[in-house]
């Protein structure tokens, strides 16, 4: 018998302080769901980057706004959806930044790496904007019994 997905929804004011609260709450949920530490760390990093982008770019730091995060655990995956009603921004339209040269500090970016970190941390990143709501969905595949991730990755 297939188990139903488990969902948790979090809502916070769109402030940088609240981003820390979101990260801590998500970390607790992922621990309760027994998500492996490495996977939980990746998803937490992606959440912090996505929520920070909402505060700084979608709402431009203006008070009185909200970020909604929905975590869903299903057979073999965890999906984290970050929703806002700020300025829309489709990350799929942004090309990846040029790779810095580790030996040349002049090529190291001072910022603008959030999307690259999100993409590198997740197995799938999708964006939708409908009825004034922006939703960035971040998917991680989890190891199945035997240590292999569903979808073929080890």
Image: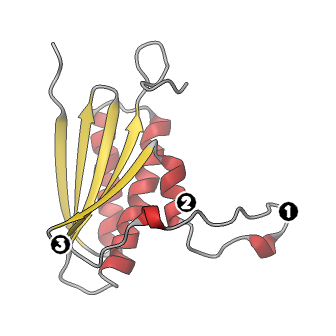
Tell me whether the residue at label 3 lies in contact with that at label 2, contact meaning CB atoms closer than 8 angstroms: no
- Identify the residue at horizontal 46%, vertical 46% (top origin): 122
Task: State the CA–CA distance, disc 2 to disc 1.
Answer: 20 Å
Name the disc covering residue 132, or none.
3
Residue 81: image location, x then y, percent: 28, 53
Left or right placement of residue 18 versus residue 91 in this view? left
- 14 and 87: which one is in front? 87
Which callout, 3 or 1, points to the residue nearer the camera? 3
Asked if 112 appears above or below 119 in the picture, the reply is below
> On the image, numbered disc 2 is attached to which residue?
116
Which callout, 2 or 1, points to the residue nearer the camera? 2
How packed mark 1 is, by other alpha carbons closer than 10 Å (few <14, some 14-19, many 20 or more), is: few
Q: Which of the marked residues, 3 or 2, is nearer the chain's N terminus?
A: 2
Residue 104: image location, x then y, percent: 84, 68
Tell me whether the residue at label 3 lies in contact with that at label 1, contact meaning CB atoms closer than 8 angstroms: no
Q: Quadrant of the C terminus?
A: top right
Tell me whether the residue at label 2 lies in contact with that at label 1, contact meaning CB atoms closer than 8 angstroms: no
Q: Which of the marked residues, 3 or 1, is nearer the chain's N terminus?
A: 1
Task: State the CA–CA distance, disc 3 to disc 1.
Answer: 44 Å
Q: Quadrant of residue 61?
A: bottom left
How packed mark 3 is, by other alpha carbons closer than 10 Å (few <14, some 14-19, many 20 or more), is: few
Asked if 31 appears above or below 60 in the picture, the reply is above
Left or right placement of residue 97 versus residue 151 in this view? right
Secondary element at image label 2? helix
Residue 47: image location, x then y, percent: 38, 56
Q: Which of the marked residues, 2 or 1, is nearer the chain's N terminus?
A: 1
> On the image, numbered disc 1 is attached to which residue?
103
Secondary element at image label 1? loop
Q: Residue furthest front?
A: 93
């Amino acid at each position: 018998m297939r188990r139903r997905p488990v969902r948790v929804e979090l809502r916070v004011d769109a402030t940088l302080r609240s981003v820390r609260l979101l990260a801590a709450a998500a970390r607790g949920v992922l621990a309760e769901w027994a998500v492996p530490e490495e996977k939980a760390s990746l998803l937490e990093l992606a959440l912090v980057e996505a929520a920070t982008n909402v505060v700084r770019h979608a709402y431009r730091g203006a008070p009185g706004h909200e970020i909604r995060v929905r975590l869903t655990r299903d057979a073999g995956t965890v999906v984290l959806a970050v929703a806002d009603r700020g300025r829309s921004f489709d990350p799929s339209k942004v090309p990846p930044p040029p790779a810095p040269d580790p030996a040349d500090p002049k090529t190291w970016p001072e910022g603008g790496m959030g999307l690259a970190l999100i993409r590198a941390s997740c197995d799938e990143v999708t964006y939708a904007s409908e009825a004034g709501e922006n939703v960035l969905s971040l998917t991680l595949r989890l190891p199945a019994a035997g240590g292999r991730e569903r979808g073929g990755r080890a």
